[in-house]
Amino acid sequence: MSDLRIILYQYINGLTYWDKRGYFLARSREECEEYRVENSVEQLSAIAVECGYRLHANLGPGLLESVYEALLAKSLSDRSLKVDRQKPIKIRYLDIVLEEGFRADLLVEDKLLIELKSTERHMPVHAKQVLSYLRLMDLPLGLLMNFGAPTFKLGCRRIVNNHTDFAASRLRVHQPEKGPST
């Protein structure tokens, strides 16, 4: 059997793991976790937007938020990303600690917050909610994905919290203004 046939057999039968560019990662899911490539928050957001777009294009609007959450989490984890669903987040204020101040819909690689909605349109409070979550978690970037919108472009927003190392995007919300350099 040629090397190529062996590789294809192992890949088809789930005996090896490869990244999306075709580079060998590991022989098991556990090894894959060990050799996980560090992704920047920008790379993670690009992957999440692509997965969200495909989900919206294939299923369309109108399903429950929990359906989109489960399917998006599965899609992201299929890309060998660590995804936490409904992760409880602590809130500390003065001397008070709330162990479960809120729940993050999706937290990707502990770096990217994704808040999901399934409403006809964005309300201003939705972006404010994500920005508050980002500030409390000290994260630079979050995505607000509304699968109830007629198109994914209308339903997806990037929310920025003091994040300056970002890619050009029309989806940015709450971007710090650049002052004159001195």
Image (tube, helix red, strand yellow):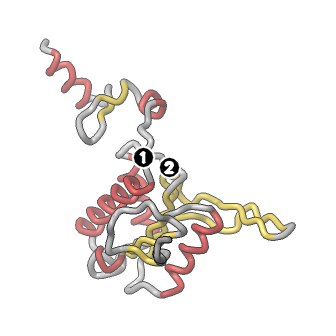
Rendered view: 58 above or below 121: above
Q: Position of residue 181 (x, y in %)?
A: 47, 71
Q: State which tag comes first along the sequence, 2 or 1.
A: 1
Is 14 left, or right, of 2 in this rendering? Answer: right
Amino acid bearing label 1:
Asn
What residue sits right under mark 2 in the picture?
Answer: 109
Please report the residue visible at 33 percent of the width from the left and 69 percent of the height from the top.
Answer: 169
On the image, the x and y values in percent for residue 107 come to: 52, 57
In the displayed structure image, the side of residue 26 where residue 130 appears, left or right: right
Judge the density around disc 1: few (<14), some (14-19), many (≥20) Cα neighbours within 10 Å. Answer: few
Q: Secondary structure at mark 1?
A: loop
Residues tagged 2 and 1 counted as in contact (Cβ below 8 A): yes
In this orientation, which residue lies closer to the viewer: 140 or 79? 140
Callout 2 secondary element: loop
Mark-to-mark CA distance, 2 and 1? 8 Å
**Of the numbered discs in the image, which one, if any, rests on residue 39?**
1
